[in-house]
Image (cartoon, helix red, strand yellow):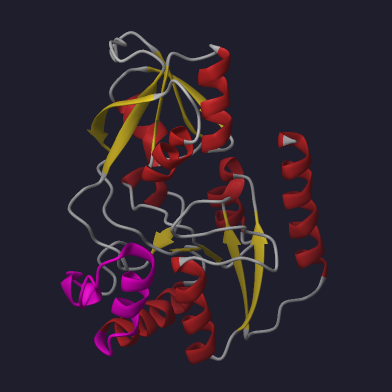
Amino acid sequence: MKGLAHIKGLAALLALLAGTASADTLRIATGGHYPPYIYNPGTERTTGLDKDLMDEICTRGGFDCIWVDLPMGDIFQALARGDVDVVTGGFGYSADREALVDFTCPYVLRGDSNGHFIAKNQQVDLITSRIGALDQSLFQDAMERANRDVRAYPTEAAALDALVAGDVDVVFGSGNMVDLAQSRDGLYDVGGYPTFSGGSVLGVSEDDPSLLVVLDTLLAELSTDGTLGQIHLRWLGDDLGDVIARCPSLDALT
């Protein structure tokens, strides 16, 4: 199934690239199912915080928006290559990612940026264990920075499968991973660790600074008029207020 998902993502991207994008076409890439930001990506049933956000941006910006779902391991490289225009799906800002692409101001800023450790044994040693994490995620990055033995997986569900199979001793991931683990017997949330995320951002190619300005301007408009707060309330349960106003400057993360 993992191979099929990869093939479907690449096929969708090739089909998307077969046509010539007009100046008003925005090619938006997601990196898999990642609640509450993206549910059912690559289908007509796609929903989530980022879907609502990008629908508003597409409407207000006058863009003809096309969505494609790509493997997490290739999404930022695809953006850097210019294969797509924007990446979205709850992606957190990090310096490593910023070396590849540019980012908008964060549209979600929350105090808790911790990931969660999930294990079959509540007494697992988090120092010496083999740790599974989502490929190319801030969770993988945090564990690598902590010099842990990290194994990367294409989805959080696949990382949990590896845990159940005994291929890893513990997995480290998002609140979504915790929800997935709760549907399986014998798994425990055994602690947290910071991911050092700078907030959820939209990624844009470094070769398209004008698009970055447009997106930041539209995000500021949505934040000021309360639309973004209503999207937060719908998907996060809280209105986070005018988050864009708390960005030091519209090009602070570029």
For the N terminus, the quadrant is top right
68 horizontally vs 52: left or right: right
The answer to whether one can see residue 83 in this image is: no
Position of residue 24 measured from the top left corner of the image (x, y, whole percent):
62, 86
Position of residue 170 measured from the top left corner of the image (x, y, whole percent):
41, 19
Residue 156 lies, with reference to residue 246, above or below; the image says above
Q: Residue 165 colored magenta? A: no
* Residue at figure coordinates x 55%, y 55% from the top left: 80
Tell me the quarter of the picture where residue 73 sits.
top right
230 horizontally vs 77: left or right: left
* Residue at figure coordinates x 36%, y 68% from the top left: 104
Tell me the quarter of the picture where residue 224 sits.
bottom left
* Residue at figure coordinates x 20%, y 76% from the top left: 241
Q: Judge by depth and name the residue closer to the eye, 175 or 129.
A: 175
Residue 202 lies, with reference to residue 152, above or below; the image says below
From which residue to which does the magenta span run? 224-249
How many numbered marks are there?
A: 0
